[in-house]
Amino acid sequence: MVLEKIIGNSAFLLILKDKLTYDSYSSDTFLEMDLKQKSQDSLPQKNIIRLSAEPRYLVVYNPLEQDRISLVSVYVSSPTVQVFSASGKPVEVQVSAVWDTANTISETAYEISFRAHIPPLGLKVYKILESASSNSHLADYVLYKNKVEDSRIFTIKNMINTEEGITLENSFVLLRFDQTGLMKQMMTKEDGKHHEVSVQFSWYGTTIKRDKSGAYLFLPDGNAKPYVYTTPPFVRVTHGRIYSEVTCFFDHVTHRVRLYHIQGIEGQSVEVSNIVDIRKVYNREIAMKISSDIKSQNRFYTDLNGYQIQPRMTLSKLPLQANVYPMTTMAYIQDAKHRLTLLSAQSLGVSSLNSGQIEVIMDRRLMQDDNRGLEQGIQDNKITANLFRILLEKRSAVNTEEEKKSVSYPSLLSHITSSLMNHPVIPMANKFSSPTLELQGEFSPLQSSLPCDIHLVNLRTIQSKVGNGHSNEAALILHRKGFDCRFSSKGTGLFCSTTQGKILVQKLLNKFIVESLTPSSLSLMHSPPGTQNISEINLSPMEISTFRIQLR
């Protein structure tokens, strides 16, 4: 709560047109975060913005160092809503239902979604109000194997079966789903080719031997067994102007596949969300398996703490558990023509036990101790949210010697997609209406986007050596990512470019003048001999560099 208050107050001060009036507002946080969490182990829930004819401000923060066009979704109290930019230009809006249960629509909350173009590390202001002349687009729903009463607002079509097939598409890909709502095929519109990319769920048990799976050990009783359901799952299909999705409800997993209708990075990958609940199972581990027609043989790739990619080999002479590796942000398989990347928002275990497959273990419930010091099993499971993106890319100019190298690199597109997923936009709404309040249209601390392959790790003040205050210096920490240049970035919608790791210091920040910038050790304890004030930053790939910076 304290952190949320600091973020809200800081954003309010930065976006306030007349900074001298800041103290005249309530000491309570003026901007309220979009998400709230009732307890430390519950999933976050969205706040509902109460609408009226008086506009409410919505401030959106971009935590990335590049320009972005991203989807912004908030809950409001009325379906008749209009969204305007700070200059008064109307914004296209999709209004979707908020589902209290799988087949019950809320009558007090509605989700609105719109595209927002936000500057790097910046804030963008929008106005939301209730209006009878709303020109927003309502989402349509098709429901299979269940029935929902007709809504007075949304168009709902109840279907008995899925013989006609379920499809989702945007300007980049077309997805086909089976009768249970699971993805089975992907067509890339760039070349019109169909690719087998199917999703299944499976269970791992534990061995019957003395040592069993526990908090530290993974000792399965053989290959994973398919997830078997007793009754066909309820499937809900959403068709909208901003996004479309398929949601299927199994006993232990609520699985959602979403496509964004956005011309840019967000529209080129498939978002997969799994809400997992295995609190009532016994000695089981649930996994999601993605099968494809990629001829990857026994080779796959995982990241090491999000910094570099390590090739892995699945060896049949080893036990199954020896072929499972940690995945922090991504894993991928590839052949001479394509690469299939699974991007993850959380750290999990991943494997590729068969050619063309990626399998990720999402949650574990084990009843016994594994004699490694914890002295208990894993029985405190909670409902768990898992978020992924699936990205299929076409390879060009493949080097046959690459398979022998000890390292590999993601594409620039997968780097940016991972950053978008792990650093989502943060919406904040004003708690109360204030007719006299005047906010700037946007706040942009950078003159322009940083290069696509450079990530701002941190920019913070340095504590003074005298007293408890801060000094007149700040620490600037930058990371240059390594990427595979043989993947084309043409038509990807990037708002940045690569500059061979070069950044002009005087063109870095907006409204500030850099008085000095000196290279330093990562710990800020030492500066290399002979270093002095520099006017250009030069970063090498796969390196993290630290600088002492003085601003005026």
Image (spheres, helix red, strand yellow):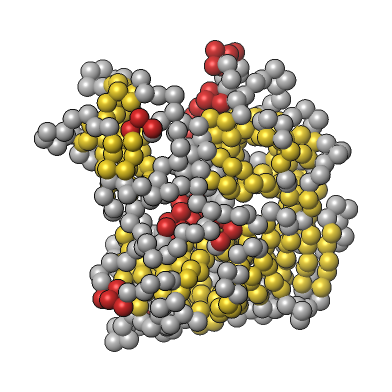
Q: Quadrant of residue 166?
A: bottom right
Does residue 5 appear in this view? Answer: no
Residue at left 38%, top 83%? Answer: 297
Residue 269 as seen in the image, left or right of residue 344: right
Residue 159 location (% of width, % of height): 82, 73
Of the pair 322 and 126, the residue shown nearer to us: 126
Up-down relation of residue 361 to residue 135 (above or below): below
Q: Residue at left 27%, top 76%?
A: 401
Whether residue 34 is situated above or below residue 147 in the rendered picture: above
Can residue 267 be seen here? The reply is yes
Residue at 83%, 55% in the rendered image: 154
Q: Position of residue 4 (x, y in %)?
A: 52, 34
Between residues 261 and 388, which one lies in front from this camera angle? 261
Residue 362 in picture, x, y percent from top left = 48, 66
Decide which of 508, 80 is in the foreground and name it.
508
Looking at this view, name the residue that lies furthest to the left.
Answer: 529
